């Protein structure tokens, strides 16, 4: 199992290294030879693993990473939000791509820190490297990305639910990760369990309305939850998200078109955005 983790992580890190170079030189449209030389593998191997991972070539992928494309996506999101507000809606109210339903923990449950609760947790390979995921009988309560299994990765979960009991289950984790990253037409409903303040819950639930391949700014997200002057507080709530990918904080960027921060690495944020854009393109083809 450890060898599989290592091999899968190595392949993703090559993708991430390529994406770092593509982001740095997006406006220059780097050639495949230059990209392969930077990553340190042959052109054929890079083309093969990249196309298998993203579904498009590196040359096509870089078009998803430009500031021009980001600003166009923000403009489209603004148009959708404006239309929603004209109709008296609080947001676009889409069905989330993963068919996610959410349930917030009660104040009493939060105060007990999970006393008497059994939380299963484990590691599994995802398209974006190794993922660490945890769940209760009510749904997924934690998801993070990492390079290898280690105590520091698990500590955040233990601190958040210090009263709970924990069961390591990598097989169960793999089943959840497979379900999360199923092709769009085969996705099954997922339940997530949210633990946060009322403001954080509003931000996270609003994020579930942002469609795959779409982007939104912090100020647009603040407007979406009815607090247009709270962009900074919204940014803090986004950064506090403990259920990576499923609550799509990776779809929030700066008004300038810059990616902004991401707790699991800026290259991973670019990888997820580009990967989702490529999936959406394939769906429309």
Image (cartoon, helix red, strand yellow):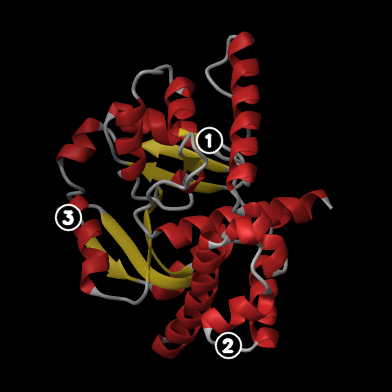
Q: CA distance from mark 2 to mark 3?
A: 41 Å
Mark toward the viewer: 2 or 3: 2
10 Å neighbourhood of mark 2: few (<14), some, or many (≥20)? some
Circle 2: element type: loop
Q: Which is more N-terminal, label 3 or label 1?
A: 3
**The N terminus: image quadrant:** bottom left
Q: Which residue corresponds to mark 3?
A: 159
Q: Position of residue 280 (x, y in %)?
A: 71, 50
Q: Which is more N-terminal, label 1 or label 2?
A: 2
Q: Are circles 2 and 3 on residues that touch, CB within 8 Å? A: no
Q: Nearer the viewer, residue 84 or 68?
A: 68
Residue 216, disc: 1
10 Å neighbourhood of mark 1: few (<14), some, or many (≥20)? many
Q: Residue at x 34, y 65 (%)?
A: 121
Q: CA distance from mark 1 to mark 3?
A: 31 Å
Residue 41, disc: 2
Q: Residue furthest right?
A: 285
Q: Quadrant of residue 44?
A: bottom right
Q: Residue at x 15, y 54 (%)?
A: 162
């Amino acid at each position: 199992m450890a060898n599989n983790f290592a091999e899968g992580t190595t392949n993703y890190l090559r993708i991430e290294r390529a994406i770092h170079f593509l982001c740095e030189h997006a406006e220059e449209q780097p050639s495949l030879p230059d990209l392969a030389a930077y990553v340190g593998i042959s052109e054929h191997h890079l083309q093969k693993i990249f196309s298998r991972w993203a579904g498009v070539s590196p040359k096509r992928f870089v078009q998803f990473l430009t500031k021009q494309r980001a600003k166009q996506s923000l403009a489209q999101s603004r148009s959708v939000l404006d239309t929603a507000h004209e109709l008296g809606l609080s947001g676009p109210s889409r069905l989330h791509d993963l068919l996610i339903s959410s349930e917030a923990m009660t104040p009493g449950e939060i105060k007990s820190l999970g006393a008497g609760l059994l939380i299963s947790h484990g590691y599994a390979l995802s398209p974006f490297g190794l993922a660490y995921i945890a769940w209760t009988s009510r749904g997924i309560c934690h998801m993070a990305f990492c390079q290898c299994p280690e105590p520091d990765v698990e500590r955040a979960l233990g601190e958040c639910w210090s009263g709970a009991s924990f069961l390591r289950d990598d097989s169960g984790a793999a089943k959840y990760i497979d379900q999360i990253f199923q092709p769009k037409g085969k996705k099954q409903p997922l339940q997530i369990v949210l633990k946060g303040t009322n403001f954080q819950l509003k931000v996270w639930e609003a994020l579930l309305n942002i469609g795959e391949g779409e982007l939104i700014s912090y100020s647009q997200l603040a407007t979406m939850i009815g607090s247009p002057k709270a962009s900074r507080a919204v940014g803090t709530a986004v950064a506090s998200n403990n259920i990576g990918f499923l609550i799509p904080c990776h779809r929030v960027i700066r008004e300038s078109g810059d990616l902004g921060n991401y707790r699991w690495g800026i290259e991973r944020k670019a990888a997820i955005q580009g990967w989702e854009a490529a999936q959406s393109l394939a769906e429309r083809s």
